[in-house]
Image: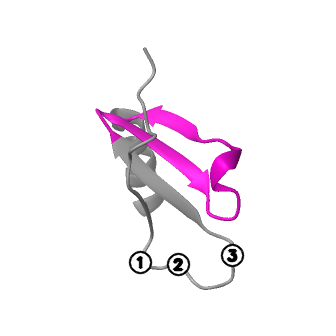
């Protein structure tokens, strides 16, 4: 069963600028979802928490 993100709190990065080119991240039950701030109802990319943490670690180098 897929996690339900309907009640999730999505947050933007502290680096977010007011130019409309941002994404938001929400967390529910060991799963992360990323969505476009300009089109919040347009869908989400969902990934397991372990994969998302590995992605962030790779970005940090």
Q: Residue 57 at what x, y percent from top left?
A: 37, 52
Element assignment for label 1: loop
Is residue 61 toward the left or the right of residue 40 in the image? left
> In the image, what residue occupies the spot 44% across and 71% down?
13
Give the distance between the C-alpha atoms of the residues marked 1 and 2, in whole angstroms: 5 Å
> In the image, what residue occupies the spot 69% across and 64% down?
38
Q: Residue 47 at what x, y percent from top left?
A: 47, 34
Q: Residue 10 at what x, y percent from top left?
A: 43, 57
> In the image, what residue occupies the spot 53% across and 49% down?
34
Instruction: Point out the stretch of residues depicted in magenta.
Output: 28-48
Residue in the foreground of this view, choosing between 45 and 10 = 10
Q: Residues at badges 1 and 2 in contact (C-beta under 8 Å)?
A: yes
Does 59 sit above or below residue 1? below
Q: Quadrant of the C terminus?
A: bottom left
**Which residue is denoted by mark 2 in the rendering?**
16
Q: Residue furthest top?
A: 1
Q: Residue 42 at what x, y percent from top left?
A: 70, 46
Give the distance between the C-alpha atoms of the residues marked 2 and 3, in whole angstroms: 9 Å
Q: Residues at badges 2 and 3 in contact (C-beta under 8 Å)?
A: no
**Which residue is denoted by mark 3 in the rendering?**
20
Q: Quadrant of the N terminus?
A: top left
Q: Which mark is residue 14?
A: 1
Hey, which quadrant is residue 7 in on the image? top left
């Amino acid at each position: 069963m897929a996690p339900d993100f309907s009640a999730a709190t999505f947050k933007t990065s502290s680096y977010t600028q007011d130019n409309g080119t941002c994404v938001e991240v929400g967390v529910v039950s060991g799963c992360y979802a990323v969505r476009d701030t300009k089109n919040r109802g347009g869908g989400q990319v969902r990934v397991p928490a372990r994969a998302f943490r590995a992605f962030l670690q790779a970005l940090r180098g």
